[in-house]
Image (tube, grey):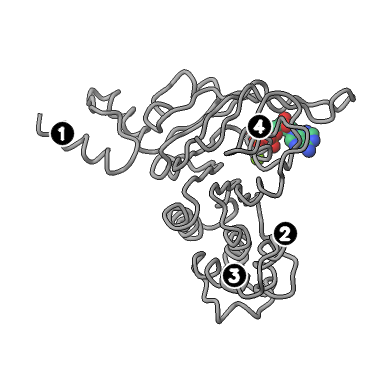
């Protein structure tokens, strides 16, 4: 177990005319090694939920434990928490600020109080991990880089902290199809190399189906369904309630079903679809 959330509720500006309920009794366990996809309509509470996990938002009601940091305690160890949970916010490139890529990526490690040597080593490693050439970009201003490169630099700044849990809020938003693909393969690589547990908010159902091993479907501040992609993407009731689309593979399977072709095994990935069609043909 790495993260345990119980009965989490949250209201923005409570007790004012602007009060807005954002979460309403969310409970979920994230295990070490999970690749969790969070899906749901805009306004369903996804960002509010993940921002609780590194205490960017203060707990109002319910409980959250991240490894041994208990956020219900009076003074939780936030330094430890933020060393454990890395957060890549939406459009993280807007948070770049330093004059060189080297300094920007090194900002977090510097705050951890690491030696110059260790900082440099981590920066180099993080920059290379996100697929940039350290020698080429280290001394450049992050503002001179392309959109996709900026986003990579911003992600490198989080990776350089070596978080055990990496959380990304719509990391592919606003990128072209090529950029989206690149960032998704980067996230997969990071899971294998640096952060064993990944939580990703995404509107790309195909990417979630292809990559995640667990899906949480948010709707109106609640988790409407949670389980494997197969369980969630074939839960027609929950999806309808949350007004959510399904991956294209599931759409194809539904269309085939209407035409009398019953595929076995509830495919959600392209590979599974091909396999299911092959089996149907050979029956
Ligand atoms: P999502 O990430 O799924 O789009 P959010 O967590 O951003 O959802 O929002 C959940 C609800 O909280 C929405 O109704 C939204 O309008 C509201 N909300 C989000 N941020 C704020 C804020 N800073 N102040 C007031 N209400 C907010
Ligand atoms: Mg959001």
Q: Earlier in the sequence, mark 1 or mark 4?
A: 4
Q: Earlier in the sequence, mark 3 or mark 2?
A: 2
Element on which disc 4 rests: loop
Crowding at mark 3 (Cα within 10 Å: few <14, some 14-19, many 20+): many
Element on which disc 1 rests: helix
Location of residue 176 with respect to 1 vertically, above or below: below
Q: Are marks 3 and 2 in contact (CB under 8 Å)?
A: no
Image point (49%, 45%), residue name: 197
Quadrant of residue 232 in the image? top left
Image point (48%, 56%), residue name: 194
Q: Earlier in the sequence, mark 3 or mark 4?
A: 4
Cα distance in 3D space between marks 3 and 2: 17 Å
Q: Quadrant of ligand 2?
A: top right
Cα distance in 3D space between marks 1 and 2: 50 Å
**Where is residue 225 shown, x and y percent of the image?**
50, 24
Residue at mark 1: 279
Residue 99 as seen in the image, left or right of residue 161: right
Crowding at mark 4 (Cα within 10 Å: few <14, some 14-19, many 20+): many
Q: Is mark 4 within 8 Å of ligand 1?
A: yes
**Where is residue 186 shown, x and y percent of the image?**
47, 58
Q: Earlier in the sequence, mark 1 or mark 3?
A: 3
Image point (53%, 58%), residue name: 176
Residue at mark 3: 123
Q: Nearer the viewer, mark 1 or mark 4?
A: 4
Residue at mark 4: 45
**Where is residue 78 shown, x and y percent of the image?**
71, 45
Residue at mark 2: 95
Q: Earlier in the sequence, mark 1 or mark 2?
A: 2
């Amino acid at each position: 177990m790495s993260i345990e959330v119980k009965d989490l509720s949250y209201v923005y500006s409570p007790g004012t005319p602007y009060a807005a309920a954002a979460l309403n009794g969310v409970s979920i366990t994230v295990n070490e090694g999970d690749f969790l996809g969070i899906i749901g309509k805009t306004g369903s509470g996804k960002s509010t939920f993940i921002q609780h996990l590194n205490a960017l938002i203060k707990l109002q009601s319910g409980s959250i434990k991240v490894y041994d940091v208990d956020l219900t305690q009076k003074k939780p160890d936030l330094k430890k928490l933020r060393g454990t949970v890395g957060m890549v916010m939406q459009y993280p490139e807007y948070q770049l600020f330093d004059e060189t890529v080297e300094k920007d990526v090194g900002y977090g490690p510097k705050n951890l109080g690491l030696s110059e040597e260790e900082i440099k080593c981590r920066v180099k490693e993080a920059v290379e991990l996100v697929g940039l050439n350290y020698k080429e970009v280290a001394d450049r201003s992050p503002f001179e880089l392309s959109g996709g490169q900026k986003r990579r630099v911003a992600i490198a700044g989080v990776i350089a902290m070596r978080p055990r849990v990496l959380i990304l809020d719509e990391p592919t938003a606003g990128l072209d199809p090529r950029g989206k693909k690149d960032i998704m393969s980067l996230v997969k690589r990071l899971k294998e190399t640096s952060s064993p547990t990944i939580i990703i908010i995404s509107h790309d159902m195909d990417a979630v189906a292809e990559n995640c091993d667990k899906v949480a479907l948010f709707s109106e501040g609640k988790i409407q369904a949670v389980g494997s992609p197969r369980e969630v993407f074939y839960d027609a009731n929950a999806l309808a309630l949350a007004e959510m689309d399904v991956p294209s593979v599931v759409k194809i399977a539904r269309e085939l079903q209407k035409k009398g072709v019953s595929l076995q095994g509830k495919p959600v990935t392209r590979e599974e679809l091909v396999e299911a069609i092959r089996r149907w043909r050979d029956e």
